[in-house]
Image: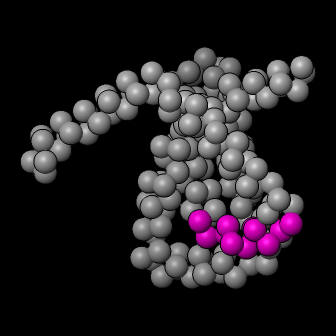
């Protein structure tokens, strides 16, 4: 009973994050991938791909450590009554963090899968995440939001003359 309750609570808390990452993961990774046009960045990505498994795991978690103080600053700003500044800072940290982690995962997934614990748990995580997203996608709310998004995209293309 407690296990099911905790699983439901985890799903409720994680679904908004999963939805953001579902919508943003690939596009943000593509934006960061454009940096490979810069020779220094391309060299950095080659170096990342050459890392051994445990170093790759460490590299994968570095953005979280770097962004943590920024998120704390956002909470401090919120506590000081600077709600808009806090919100903008936290949103920027989330978008930038997701972009970097998405690109890192694209680069490091083959290496990370050589870590037995990661190789065992990542498919389970992916299955759970996909199941949660399929439940959300089957909801009426999702379908309405999807229609609104598609309509907005269509109007944007018509306005730009690219329809």
Image coordinates for residue 65, horizontal then vertical, percent? 75, 51
Magenta residue check for 114: yes
Front residue (pair 159, 148): 148
Image coordinates for residue 32, horizontal then vertical, percent? 48, 62
Residue at horizontal 13%, vertical 48%? 163
Residue at horizontal 37%, vertical 24%? 144
Image coordinates for residue 146, horizontal then vertical, percent? 37, 32
In the rendered image of this protein, does residue 63 appear above or below residue 150? below
Residue at horizontal 43%, vertical 60%? 31
- The N terminus sits in image quarter: top right
Q: Quadrant of residue 100?
A: bottom right
Front residue (pair 80, 112): 112
State the predominant SS element of the stretch in magenta: helix
Residue 60 can be seen, yes or no: yes
Residue at horizontal 60%, vertical 50%? 97
What span is in magenta? 106-116
Image coordinates for residue 96, horizontal then vertical, percent? 54, 49
Q: Is residue 139 left or right of residue 45?
A: left
Q: Quadrant of residue 16?
A: top right
Q: Is residue 4 left or right of residue 24?
A: right
Q: Give the image's coloring scheme.
A: one colour
Residue 70 can be seen, yes or no: no
Magenta residue check for 126: no
């Amino acid at each position: 009973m407690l296990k099911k309750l905790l699983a439901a609570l985890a799903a409720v808390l994680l679904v908004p994050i999963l939805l953001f990452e579902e919508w943003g993961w690939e596009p943000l990774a593509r934006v960061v991938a454009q940096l490979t046009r810069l020779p220094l960045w391309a060299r950095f990505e080659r170096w990342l791909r050459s890392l051994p498994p445990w170093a790759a795991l460490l590299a994968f978690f570095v953005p979280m450590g770097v962004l943590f103080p920024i998120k704390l600053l956002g909470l401090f700003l919120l506590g000081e009554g600077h709600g808009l500044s806090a919100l903008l800072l936290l949103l920027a940290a989330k978008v930038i963090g997701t972009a970097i982690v998405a690109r890192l995962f694209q680069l490091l997934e083959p290496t990370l899968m050589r870590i037995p614990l990661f190789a065992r748990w990542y498919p389970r995580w992916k299955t759970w995440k996909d199941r949660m997203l399929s439940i959300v996608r089957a909801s009426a709310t999702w379908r309405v939001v999807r229609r609104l998004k598609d309509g907005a995209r269509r109007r944007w293309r018509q306005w730009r003359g690219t329809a």
